[in-house]
Image (cartoon, rainbow, N blue to C red):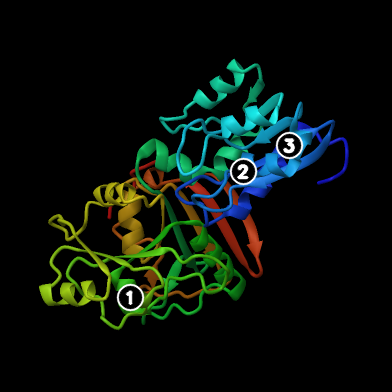
Amino acid sequence: MTERGVTETDAMRHAIALAEYGEGDVNPNPLVGAVVLRDGEVIGRGYHRAFGGPHAEVIALRDAGAGARGATLVVTLEPCCCHGKTPPCTDAILAAGISRVVVAQRDPSPEIAGKGIEILRAAGIEVEEGLLAEEASRQAEIFLTYVTRGRPFVQLKFASSLDGRIATRTGDAKWISGSASRVEAHRLRRRLSAILVGVGTVVADDPQLDVRHVVGKDPIPIVLDPSGRIPLDARVLRSSIDPIIVTATMPVDVEEALRSRGIHVWRMMIDDTGRFDLAELLDRLGTDGIDSVLVEGGGETAACFLSAGLVDKVSLFLAPILIGGRDAVAGIGGSGVDRVADAPRLHNVTIRRVDDDVLITGYPRRRPALSS
């Protein structure tokens, strides 16, 4: 974007696009993009590239150089005003001589929460809030959920046939979706900090739970394994990041074998039905700095998260294939709902083609609803 006549709205769209380049590298920080605009021309741009590194505003101001004096800074999130791993962005903005700042949304973090904007205004800088706020907040949904709720953002992802099956009656599931969808699914994995499956999925499919189809950092594998069924030669145990195995009654010798390999074993209570308190699990993950979890399987695990009202977003890859059969594996397990009116309905739905498949993404409007 180098042409003249660039509006602040154009610049904000550009900042939002820039922020995406930090995908998977900034967690638990937010995706943030920034643009310096002067006389309708972009003279500086930046995005938050890695956790602990310079923020988007600082990079954009450095890119603009002396031209930043008297210019407008357009940024997707309120500039920080506190010392953390980097100095406050408000200091850099004041030092650069910016005269106007356009912010898409406030940062809800307790140490910021409008204070950055107040500092800028007190220094005589004009600040406008809310430009493309909805788009920016959707992009920052992981960060906003983590900061405001204190627990990870939960995204449920699965691939199913047109008749809602994720495996045949024999358990065969490779491959329902096409290769392009698998690449897209790995992009989702890269965006989130952790990936969670039930031990049944590990036993049946022996998944790697990595991002081998794209460039990026592998998510932390989490396996729900109440009784310690996980095979010690499972591929997930050879992940580039030490997995977390959540258990209740795992035999001590199995636990010791896992711990000797650097694998984390978390013991938690289960209820009378043999299920974990998933809200408690998410709280613990949040305390450990894990801001997001991609729930990938299987159907019973998906049903448990849905019934607990803990799913923030759903992504379904729908493949043009018909499996059929009463005993084929359904995408969502459990006992389901008694009435259609009680079913979780998605809103803000987007639909797009991924080669021959269709990717449907939306946000559950009503929770809890399914009984698992």
What is the C-alpha distance between the residues marked 1 and 2?
36 Å
Residue 247 in percent (x, y) is at 20, 64
Q: Which image quadrant for residue 298?
A: bottom left
What residue is shown at x 61% (from left), y 18% (from top)? 123
Q: Nearer the N terminus, badge 3 or badge 2? A: 3
Residue 341 in percent (x, y) is at 40, 43
How busy is the neighbourhood of tag 2: few (under 14 within 10 Å), some, or many (20 plus)? Answer: many
Determine the secondary structure under disc 1. helix
Task: Give the labeled residue for mark 1.
Answer: 237
What residue is shown at x 50% (from left), y 24% (from top)? 115
What amino acid is labelled 1 in the image?
Leu
Task: Give the labeled residue for mark 3.
Answer: 36
Q: Nearer the N terminus, badge 1 or badge 3? A: 3
Task: Give the labeled residue for mark 2.
Answer: 56
What amino acid is labelled 2 in the image?
Ala
Residue 60 visible to an observer of this rendering: yes
Q: In this rendering, is residue 79 above or below 128?
A: below
